[in-house]
Every structure is written in C-alpha cells, then in structure tokens.
Image (cartoon, rainbow, N blue to C red):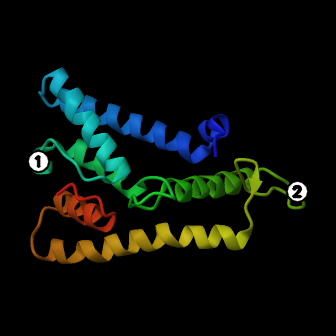
C-alpha cells in the first residue's frame, strides 16, 4: 500500500529475510566444509537456501549428493516454508512466529504470579485463544502427515534421512527432488 517502512517492519517479512539468509549461510558453510570450493559453495548454498525457504523447488545440486547436515538444514527450512500470503509450502512463517510467541508466553507465565495477566502479542496485536488454536492446527497436522508418510518409506527399506527429505519436500510442496 505504499508504506515501505511498515512493510520492512513486518515481523513475517523480517523473519523471511533472516531465515533465508541464515539457512543459505548454513548451507554454504556445510557445502564448503564438505570439500566444495568456496565460490561453488556460495552459489549452491545460496540457491538451495532460498529455494528451500521459499519452496520454489530450484536446485543446482542433486539432493542425493548433499551431506547429511545440508539435508537436515534443508528439511528444517522446507518445513518452515515462506510467508502466509504466498504460494510457498511448509507451515508458513507466521504460524512459526505464533508458535514461538505461545512458547514464550508459557515460559513467561511460569515466573509470574497466578493472578498476573499476560497475553500473547504478535507485532503489538493481541492474539486470542481461538485464533492461536486455529493457527497451531496446521503445524500439528503437517508433522502428523510427515510422520505418517514417512512410515511406508522406512518399511520399504529407504534410508531414514533420505526418506524424510523426500516426504518433507513433497508435503511442503517444495519440489527439491
């Protein structure tokens, strides 16, 4: 709506930038440590990090050749996914932010007296209980679907990490494989 400052301060937008850069940096470091030269590690790590976080599905490396640490990092990134208003898959960043807010509230309430009022807030806006429950259903269902989908792969003898990578990629509509 033309208000760039408000957009830049949006917690979900900031989380998308931070998560994308963190995962890209982690993947770059993992690839460099695995013996890929630094320019190639930067290229592949950045592309894979952005692709996994935004669930765009582009890859310059065959995922089967990725080190285990890179697979775990990609799985986490694909699970989180992109912004709530996008076509990205995963549980979405806003849901992650709400989940973290709920966890923070629960921890904070442990140190408060029983009669103290502490309400969850995201970006200064209070979250009511029904809203939080509706938001938290998706991550719960996502994890249940991933778990249920993983079982047939394991029963057929697939390597657990490779099977998890495939299931999360498919469930999160990422397409890295």
Residue at figure coordinates x 33%, y 42% from the top left: 50
Q: Within 10 Å of the Cα at label 1, are there few (<14), some (14-19), or many (20+) other Cα atoms?
A: few
List the single residue furthest toward the right.
115
Is 64 placed left or right of 117 in the picture?
left
Give residue 116's mark. 2
Secondary structure at numbered mark 2:
loop
* 43 and 129: which is toward the camera: 43
* 109 and 131: which is toward the camera: 131
- What x and y, as percent, mark residue 160? 19, 62
* 63 and 9: which is toward the camera: 9
State the image quarter where residue 61 is shown. Answer: top left
- What x and y, as percent, mark residue 90? 40, 61
Q: Within 10 Å of the Cα at label 2, are there few (<14), some (14-19), or many (20+) other Cα atoms?
A: few
User: Which mark sits nearer the N-terminus, 1 or 2?
Assistant: 1
State the image quarter where residue 32 is shown. Answer: top left
Is 27 placed left or right of 108 in the picture?
left
Query: Where does label 1 land, which residue?
Result: 62
* 48 and 110: which is toward the camera: 48
**Above or below for 122 versus 38:** below
**Above or below for 170 versus 5:** below
């Amino acid at each position: 709506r033309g208000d760039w400052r408000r957009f830049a301060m949006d917690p979900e937008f900031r989380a998308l930038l931070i998560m994308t850069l963190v995962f890209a940096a982690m993947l770059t470091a993992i690839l460099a440590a695995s013996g890929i030269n630094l320019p190639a590690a930067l290229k592949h790590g950045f592309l894979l990090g952005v692709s996994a976080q935004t669930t765009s599905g582009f890859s310059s490396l065959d995922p089967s050749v990725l080190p285990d640490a890179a697979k775990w990092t990609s799985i986490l990134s694909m699970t989180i996914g992109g912004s709530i208003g996008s076509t990205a898959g995963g549980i979405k960043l806003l849901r992650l932010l709400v989940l973290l807010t709920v966890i923070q509230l629960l921890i904070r309430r442990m140190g408060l007296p029983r009669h103290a009022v502490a309400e969850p807030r995201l970006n200064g806006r209070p979250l009511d209980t029904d809203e939080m429950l509706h938001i938290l259903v998706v991550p719960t269902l996502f994890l249940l679907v991933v778990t249920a989908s993983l079982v047939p792969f394991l029963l057929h003898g697939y390597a657990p990490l490779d099977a998890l990578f495939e299931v999360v990629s498919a469930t999160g509509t990422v397409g890295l494989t």
